[in-house]
Amino acid sequence: MRDPKFPAGPAALVLCAMQFAVFERMSLGVFSFVNDAPAWFLQLVSEDDARASAITLAEHFPMLEVFLPIAESFWKTTSSERLQSEFWTESDAAGTEYHLQAFAFNSLTPGSGEQGEMHRFLVLDLADATYNERQQVQLYAHEMSMSYDTISRLNQEVERATRAKSDFLASMSHEIRTPLNAILGMADLLSASELNEDQRKYVAVFQRAGSNLLNLINDILDLSKVEAGHLTLEAIDFELADVVGRATELIRVRALEKGVAVTSAIAPGLPPWFIGDPTRLRQVMLNLLGNSMKFTDQGSLHVGVQQDPDDPEPGHLRFSISDTGIGIPADKLTSIFENFTQADTSTTRKYGGTGLGLSISRQLVELMQGRLWVESDLGKGSTFFFTAKFGVSDRQDATVTAGEGPAVPATTSADLAPMHILLADDSADNRFLIQAYLKGSACALEFAENGEIALAKMMSEHYDLVLMDAHMPVMDGYEAAAEFRAWERETGRPRLPVLALTADAFKESIERSVQVGFNTHLTKPIRKATLVEAIQKYALACDRPGDAPGITVYVDSAIAEIAPIYLQNIRADLGRLLEAEQTGDFETIRTLGHNLKGTGASYGFDRISEIGAVMEQAGKDKLLEPARTCIAEFKIYLENVRVEQERE
Amino acid sequence: MIQKKICMVGTFGVGKTSLVARFVRSIFSDKYHTTIGVKIDKKQLVVEGQEVTLMLWDLAGEDAVTQVRPAHLRGAAGYILVADGTRSATLDAAIDLRERVAAELGDVPFIFVINKADLREEWQVTDASLESLSQRDWSYLLASAKTGEKVEQLFLDLAGRILKPAHGGPASALDAANA
């Protein structure tokens, strides 16, 4: 009941009408009413309690157990501020909710003494309006936060889906390229064997069809990579004339067959070297040249490069590829750049192709910050233009453009030094193919069907080189290579050349190969020459362990005594050759190569004659790289060769 | 009569208030009303022949600025950690909260509840994360405030464990204080 100290006046009535329940603190936790209890209070506290002269409020409002201890400290001060509790919500028996807030304050009332009398008040307020405002703000914040979470989750799902697409492409590319590798390789081998005319024709058909299929797969992969954002351009120095020269050279073969002339012109005044991605630039030019070639039966193709007329910035170029072909109708000038589209659906039959080339070219050009378009006169020809932004390199030197310099002698498996090679590949076809590729060599090939077997062999036996498929059951090539490299480091062994051989052509896979410790990444389908060159390069580049298997040469009893003396003599040549290699003395390389070619076989060292022949040619052609390879091989041969008399 | 304080804790929007409303008043509303401060409800039960009043302190859900306040936990005989099955982060948050609540309350009974079992097909909380709760010997229930599934069991289980502490552990001292 109301404290008789406070007379019921208009003020008390107003407090009640404003839904305030005002109490004066009597003792710790015990309060007396200042005004009559408002209606809400009577919904939460029984009539008897509400009408008592004193009330222990925390029994009815548990939240005050949290607030009152703080209020007690506050009341001890004489602050004129007020202390405010948090919101809390109580429900009555019917489930109606009351949002409450408590306030504590001190008040000095005029009293008998000079100081007056200090009263400590507690007010309970039905704070629905302010509560609702706060709730609205909070609700808005929570909804924003949940939307943000949803967006982040959806983003993650999109990223996951993109990754899944990319993984799918990688595995599809692997699945398609692996058998294609076997088909193309076998076709190569078959065409090199003795065949009658009909058989040769048949083989040529599946070589050609296989190549087309491979090109198609490469196109699809390129397109998917661009679309998935996986394709990033390189930024390396390249010589413009070299890229243009190589591209036109490749198309010239087909042009010759058709009697179409191919010309090119680079505007004078352009710097010779640029910074960009020459491989992708060449790909665009080849696509456009191939496209023009396809639709041109007579006349000429012309490639022009000049400063972009609309952009004077150095390195910003405009390329044009003009033909005298059938031309493109005006209404098809844009649609031809879409996937799987040709100007006339009937031309698909006549001219072949998937219609992917122009779409890929357009996307590559856009990656080069340029654009691709075409202008055409129906029946007279078309000109494809594209612009690209390159950096300008300060290099000035000129390299030999393909087709102009002397041909590099092709490497054959017979050129390989004898070595012990391990091939880890789960595909029996591929194992057979690589075996066939290395058939003519002195290499001993061993197989492992998965990474685990390969790893065990690599750790227990000596090999000169390992070819390893990246994707294998049980343990894949990446894991095997990584474990092997770790083992090499732990045991302090020299680094064995381990080459990844896989159909997986993604840049990420190549980077991963290097990361796990493969020396290089060879992409299937691999041509014989590429494989042999890689083996040669990496086998020579490695440190040879002392226990390398020797090369035993069996010689005729008549020369058994003089053969070692011959070897002794030509060891002196090795010193001169190494010196000549250093100074670029091709004449010495040619002469010594010529001598070795003539003498080796007559002492029973056929291999020396072979090396000598290649050396002589390299000297004659003044080509340092093949000369260096020969000299290195010659050195290894001399280090490992052992002479034995032929058994009777 | 025995009174026991139980705190509902968890991230905002997981359904703490809805679980209490379902348990105390057998109602459910799809409309989301975020709790400001604390919401206090009472429910009388008979557990193992004992009459008990549960004081349910439904604490405002944690968000970027709101954190559970130790003062609100004080005196609780047990607590319920609420997560939302459709938001996996809320279970991580509940696990994190358990540590903070235990630091304040000590070794009192608690139970995890993963709410919104009616939306099972939209769940992000995986069996593996539930398994990790079991591995730590933490009891949990998959409940739905919307359908009422396991809601009663949730409160009864916890009340039972509060009233019958295993081998008179540290909880018994608190019981005496709360009784």
Image: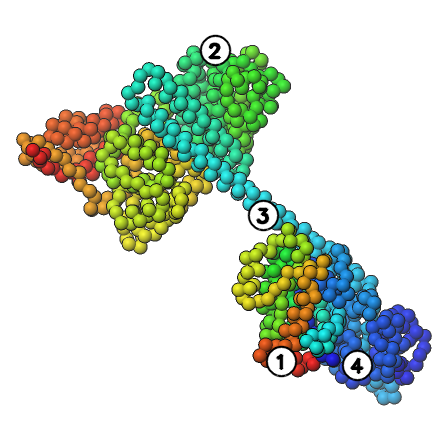
Measured as percent of width and height from the top left, residue B57 is found at 71, 70
Identify the residue position indicated by label 3 in the image.
A156
Compare marks 2 and 4 and give the one earlier in the sequence.
4
Asked whether disc 2 touches disc 4, contact meaning CB atoms under 8 Å apart, the reply is no
Residue A39, image quadrant: bottom right
The answer, for residue B23, to whether it is visible in the render is yes
Q: Secondary structure at mark 2?
A: loop
What is the residue that sits farthest to the bottom in this orientation?
A: A113
A567 relative to B122, above or below:
above
Measured as percent of width and height from the top left, residue A623 is found at 27, 28
The one nearer the camera, A439 or A625, is: A439
Amino acid type at circle 1 is Ser
Measured as percent of width and height from the top left, residue A109 is found at 86, 82
Dot 2: few (<14), some (14–19), or many (≥20) neighbours within 10 Å?
Answer: some
Residue for point 30% across, 51% down: A488
Q: Label 4, label 3: how many angstroms apart (C-alpha)?
A: 55 Å
Chain containing mark 4? A
Q: Which mark is residue A298?
A: 2
Is A469 displayed left or right of A555 in the figure? right
Is A565 displayed left or right of A136 in the figure? left
Identify the residue position indicated by label 1 in the image.
B172
Looking at the rendered structure, whether the residues under marks 1 and 4 are on a common chain is answered as: no
Compare marks 3 and 2 and give the one earlier in the sequence.
3
Residue for point 55% across, 26% down: A340
Chain containing mark 1? B
Amino acid type at circle 2 is Gln
